[in-house]
Amino acid sequence: MTPHCFTPKRMLSALTAVILMAGTAVAEPAHGIAMYGAPALPADYTALPYANPDAPKGGRIVWGNTGGFDSLNPFVLKGNVPWQMRFIAYESLMGRSWDEPFTLYGLLAETVETGPNREWVEFTLRPEARFSDGSPVTVEDVIWSYETLGTEGHPRYLGFWGKVGKIEQTGERSVRLTFNTEDRELALIAGLRPILKKAQFEGKALDGDPLRDIPIGTAPYVVTDVDPGRQVTLKRNPDYWGNDLSFRRGTHNFDEIRIDFYGDGDVQFEAFKAGELSFIREFNAEAWASRYDFPRAQAGDVIKTEIPHQKPSGMTGFAFNTRRAPFDDIRVRDALIHAFNFEFINDTMTGSRQPRITSYFSGSQLAYGEGAPEGAELALLQTLEDLPPGTLEGYGLPQSDGSLRNRRNMRKAVQLLEDAGWSAEGGTLRNAAGDPFRMEILLRQGDQQDKAIMDLYVKSLEQLGIDATVTLVDDAQFTERETAFDYDMIDYRRSLSLSPGNEQWLYWGQESATQNGSPNLAGVASPAVDALIDRLLTSESHEDFVTTAQALDRVLTAGRYVIPIWQFSVGRIAHVKELKHPDYIPIYGDGVDWMPGVWWWED
């Protein structure tokens, strides 16, 4: 099935409109808001373009996770929460369309309005908006949610709150946020903050009992049954306030969603083969081609569906912890990237079916081009200081000949390590003080693919005289150590959008590098990166935005913070035959708002 919803020609037309309308401000309350230009859907739209408004309701799906959980509160740092909770059990003032780069439509709020330069944003609540317990959503709840999440919540919420100068009630159902920072994206970010019920936490800490004090939300699904560490069941609320909302037509079609937990990916896959799970996402092209021939698939009871998309590759691989020596030395990181024999590993693991990620925004118009920068991108980069080596010359990842030995790159790795003060003595790599080079690679227990990759990589490191240890820990330990940045190298996955914005501060801003629990796992702390993020958020034309994103992509890649592996250029879902989805695929392809968001059950 093709993503005819946003062809390249249509994308070009949309971007042209974006450029022409970039400086246009919302002059009055509107049904939606776009980062640039106007929303694609009119005020009287009847459903999202990738939803089937006539989809039947009913059925149950069983979802599989690996590991376990000890919390059902996704809004605080404490505890290990099923990742789905934040997306399927809670709502915000606005909802995102995944068929546009970055556009929001009214959800809890019926209208949105901004100042001429987006220095403030005002939302008006829908009178019918309700929490799952039937109580109305009030301006008081909204203000409390912003303040509480911004001061007591997970670190992902703290940066935005620091940019809010004032929040105030402006009418019976309206609330205005005034910003203290020039940042055009803040008006949209404000619309995506989850709204919780103030009365529930009166006299309680937000991070109280993680399994009993489950935050009350407004979404179609509510938690009904919990088997701690093993299973969570959510059911669709028949009295959900937004059943007739255009934004919700054809979405959240299953009566029940159950999430089961398994010790590792292999056990989870066996459960799927046996019919205990309704679907499974496959991230390995070789496995997709070879291991879905079990009896239920051969009988037609299991179907393989591929989902194309137009989003950036993002970054998947293994991140260095640059807060620690010797990984704070770019020469050491460069050496370890050269020692990673991608071509051989890719052939071993995927049959070379998946191309390598070449940069953070590869596969999209936001990716930097091959060779040295030119034109506007070069001019921008020349204004920055402390650029990583190779940025202006045209950095690219090293390539091997695909053989096991990887001789040329290994020789380069040895030279880089010697330049950094490391030399092999008696088969052990040591620095000038005689200290051996030791490193720990932290992985989740049960992630067999990452373990197999690292087993191959460790053999190359041993040839350099490096004592590398792969440590497998359960989900709770992994989260604890990830939060505290307690690792030398860690498996890494960062999805990126066609409209990168404030989340970039969290991913690789200097401030987030020292903030426990932030997603800046590599500890990126670069004045050049910060300057480019700041420019992204203040760009007033699409051309400048794209140029800035390309420059940021180039600087991050040249920083050698991550060893990239392969792209996921197409989504892959194996599912029971009863699960159906619309033919129309959004430009962002697969995601929780598409599967299970707009799928349905049909016997």
Image (cartoon, rainbow, N blue to C red):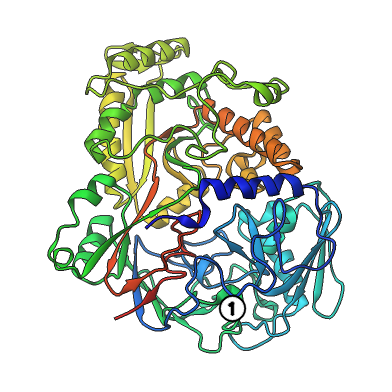
217 relative to 235 in the view: left or right: right
Q: Is mark 1 on a helix, strand or loop?
A: loop
Residue that label 1 marks = 216
Quick one: 436 or 349, which is closer to the camera? 349
* Looking at the image, residue 358 lies above or below residue 196: above
Q: In which quarter of the image is the N terminus?
A: bottom left
The number of callouts visible is 1
* Looking at the image, residue 116 lies above or below residue 439: below
Q: In which quarter of the image is the C terminus?
A: bottom left
450 relative to 166 in the view: left or right: left
Which residue does the image show at 23% across and 56% down from the upper left? 266
Residue 111, given in percent of the width and then of the height, sits at 75, 71
Which residue does the image show at 73% across and 54% down from the upper left? 186
Inspect this view and state whether residue 567 appears: yes
Residue 295, given in percent of the width and then of the height, sits at 12, 65
434 relative to 348 in the view: left or right: right
Residue sitting at the far left:
295
Inspect this view and state whether residue 516 appears: no
Quick one: 279 or 168, which is closer to the camera? 279
* Looking at the image, residue 454 lies above or below residue 84: above
Inspect the image, locate mark 1, and give the three-letter code of the amino acid beneath it: Ile
How packed mark 1 is, by other alpha carbons closer than 10 Å (few <14, some 14-19, many 20 or more), is: many
